[in-house]
Amino acid sequence: MGDIFLKTLNMSIAASWLILAVVLLRFMLRKAPKWIAVLLWGIVALRLVVPFSFESVLSLIPSAETFNAHNIQYETPAISSGISAVNNAVNPVLGETFAPNPVGSVNPLYVWTLVASAIWLVGIAAILLYAVISYVRVRRSVAERMPYEANIFLCDHVKSPFILGLIRPKIYLPSNMDATSMEPMVAHEKAHLARLDHWWKPLGFLILAVHWFNPLCWVAYVLLCRDIELACDEKVIRQMDLDEKKQYSTVLLECSTQRRLVTICPLAFGEVGVKERVKNVLNYKKPAFWIIVVAVAACAVVTVCFATNPVTAEPNTPNTERPTFREDPSGNLILEEYWNPRDGSYYAQDIREKFPAHIVEDGMDSQKFILPQQQECYEQAVASAGLDTDKVIGALLETICSSPALSSNPGDYIEEHPIEYRELTYYGRYTLKYCFARFEEGNETGLDGHIMRTVCEDIAVGWGEAFPTDYVVITGQMWYDAFKSNALGLMEQYREIELAERYPASYLLLSMLGEVSIT
């Protein structure tokens, strides 16, 4: 669900640029036919709904994928907004606040993504529930009605004309409306039906329900409803003279009072934006042909520039070539070809195509080799600086055990000091030697013992060593005694070289005890 939410979030961010462009273009094309604006909102709807888009060198969208699901779940969190200033301001904060936890199964930010996904679903459910309740209320208000003609009904509880229904839509008119006012309103509502507007508004509301977290989508929905009405007005008044337009405007003003029940229902099509519509009706002039041509061209430009994704660059230089090997029956690797790695979106596909089947999963696990690489870096740093690792590791343990003082759960101390604990795992074999030496002295039955036991297990598991499941662990010292006994028993089952490969932590302990020698 987290991946679906991130995909929707990326789509919404990309569509926001298009919404801003449409709002600006809508203002610039005030003299153009109003159906042009409705067409533009249709393009916005496609951008919000379709999970893919064509790539174009003319695209002005900074980034089609601001949040990468794989990055958030497995790597150091970062955004790719396509705007350097934004990335430079946000990414350091994300990296520091939601840094990967070596003792956790997933990144902290991915956990928050799952929480956000749950809130997103609750929001969708609440909005849809609101739509259903408001529809039922309007439906009940027209339960008592009188047929007028075909699908038109008169109702005492109706204060303003509106359309209700999707499959068999019906027009509802106030029962006290006189014939002079009724004629233009019926023509207006029939124009809505001819344009299928009773479908477009609920569809727009459904899209809004999915993207409810984006304020620009609310702006787009409000403007869509207004532009639908303006386009319908133009269709009706196209052949009217000035007196007929004045009569039409008067009827709109009369219908603008006491219309709240229909306005709040997303599935009912009533009169909105009356002030703007009256002004538009009275000032309406048939657009010149060149204005229509310019408006259509502007729509095409906006579509190409904001409804398409930027081209994804693929590196293709000799310096980026990588070798592919195959394994012969004897286990030797033979060079087969050089290939050009592509961007991260093709990572999984390329790994599966280029790697032998039995190591594909290792290649897909981006976290598996991070700890050994960090430990190797720390070993080189220790050797170069001549660092007293026992002093450093002892200080790290002391810091971890310092708080929270009121807790009796060792895990709480590790969670309180994730950076110090991560440092312990990075020191690798130096941490194991320090802990094993303290355990050999005995009496490590307190908090220190539990912390040392946990970090020893994490380092050993990171090295690929499996632990027996029948350990009876009450204190850290008891764990060590069981681990030591098991390590001594392994000497009878494996040759020294095999023992070092399968059980590196146990082999390190045996070397400290003088049972084996590290070469």
Image: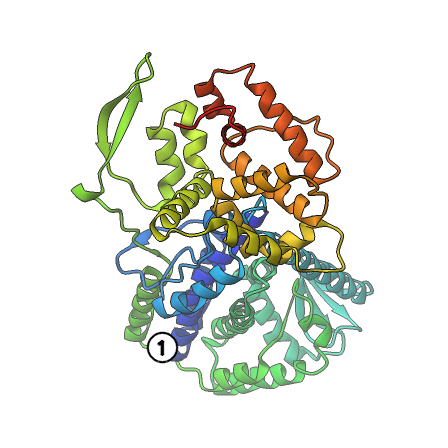
In the image, what residue type sits under mark 1?
Pro
Residue furthest right as drawn: 144
Of residues 462 and 437, the one nearer the viewer is: 437
Pointer 1 residue = 287
Question: Tag 1, which secondary structure?
Answer: loop
**Whether residue 259 is situated above or below residue 317 in the rendered picture:** below
Residue 299 placed where, x, y %?
A: 35, 66
Residue 63 is left or right of residue 206, and the answer is left
Residue 104 placed where, x, y %?
A: 59, 46
**Whether residue 481 is situated above or below residue 295 in the rendered picture:** above
- To which quarter of the image does residue 349 belong? top left
Give the class, few, some or many, for how many residues have Cα within 10 Å of label 1's Cα (few <14, many ≥20): few
Of residues 404 and 315, the one nearer the viewer is: 404
Of residues 366 and 121, the one nearer the viewer is: 366
Residue 108 is left or right of residue 291, and the answer is right
The reply to whether residue 108 is visible in this rendering is no
Residue 282 placed where, x, y %?
A: 49, 86
